[in-house]
Amino acid sequence: MACDLLFTGDIMASITLNEVCKTENGYDYNRVFSELRPILKNADLVVGNLETPLAGEAARYSFAQYSFNTPDEFARQLKEDGFGLLSLANNHCMDRGIDGLRRTIDALDTVGIAHTGAYRSKEERGNICILKRGDINFAFLSYTYGTNAFFHHNFLPEDAQYAVNRIQPEETLPGAIDLLERDAVAARVHELYEVDNPLYQSAIQPYWQQIKEDIDLARKQGGEVIVMLLHVGGQRDAIPDAYTKYVVNRLAKMGVDAIICNHQHVLHNVSMIGHVPVVWCLGNLVYTVDAGKAYEPREMESSLLKMRWEKINGIPRLSGMTGIPTQSVLDKNGGTAVYPLKILIDNNQGREKDRLLAVRQRNVNLLRNLPEMTPVGDCLEYSIMMMP
């Protein structure tokens, strides 16, 4: 019995999006994913990365750039549109502190969306997120490089270090690599990740030991396919940085079956490390731009990534991967709706249609690791690679 897991890029929610979706009775986000709804509902499981807390109105909704908090109606809309699992280990999960993080989990439980990567207790952390689809038990792990502690100073309390899965110490602490210092990342990896470096042993190795224990626990608790949801990488980097490559390559050797990366906010390629498929970044599923803020057009572009799994002789196998290019479209008020590129191309003419055709060609070939000008057909969904 084959089943399809559908992965999306980062789910962003800005000040402007909340303002545009505000109604007399609350908030209405129905239009944001309406054009994707048939695709999302057709998958066996839709997995996204929620880049905003749901900390409640008392904690103030998004009021400043990079300081997010979104009404609960957004979570209800995600549920209605087909999302079954959200990754919470990302750089915005602590935008409203530990209380906001815990309320986010409460809000997702209320609407019935599974979650991974953030926890309200040590006991909760010890239960791996395992979801059965078809006849396969999928285990989902989620980790982040940081929590924006350098910006909002909401460091995890000493008695709640379990609350967010991390791959390194929080920003500014000894052993942390600052991804904003692009020119220094490669040198810092070389400096810090020497096994005989005392700082590595004291400040970094414990995180990797925890990851290995979690992978082993996922198997012990019945996970047949382990999917790593990873939040890492330099924002808007055209290719993965040295730290991302280090982390992904190390994880691929630790027993996971697939790695899905996000955070870079631009689309990257899909590749294989041994038998492990790696999706290096799916871009921004929904990208919203606050008034007056500049943005790169590629931040509006993304792709859905479908993995088809089936059991062959009792063993789960990845039998194929496909991509569905998408794009966020802004209206005159700053509201955002996400469209499959196929629909936008069919609904436009002239120069705009030519531009969209070029975007589709570039992004499909990027996913496939092919030259940018390689011809692509007129499809909604494109084969990325097939597994034996």
Image (spheres, rainbow, N blue to C red):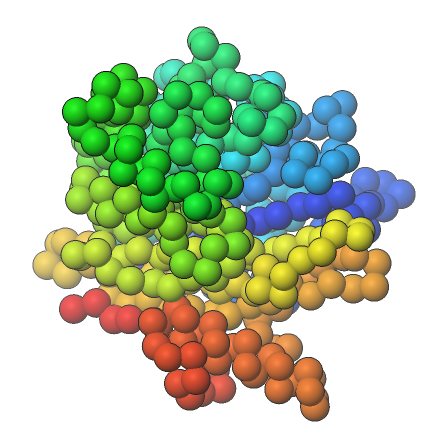
Residue drawn 40% across and 24% down?
A: 169
Q: Residue at x 26, y 24 (%)?
A: 200
The location of residue 381, given as percent across then percent down, is: 45, 75
Q: Is residue 230 above or below residue 239?
A: above
| Vertical side of 207 occupied by 366: above or below | below
| Residue nearer the viewer, 129 or 181 | 181
- Quadrant (top left/top right/bottom left/bottom right) for the C terminus: bottom left
Q: Is residue 35 left or right of residue 129?
A: right
In this view, the residue farthest toward the top is: 159
- x, y (%) of residue 354? 62, 86
Residue at the left extreme of this rendering: 313
Can residue 338 be seen by looking at this rendering?
no
- The location of residue 304, given as percent across then percent down, is 47, 62
Residue 384 sits in quarter? bottom left
Query: Image quadrant of residue 370?
Result: bottom left
Q: Quadrant of the N terminus?
A: bottom left
Residue 167: x and y, percent?
35, 32
- Residue at x 51% of width, y 30% of height: 147
Asked whether residue 219 is in view, the answer is yes
Which quadrant would residue 92 be assigned to in this image?
top right
- For the residue pair 253 and 131, the one nearer the viewer reads as 253
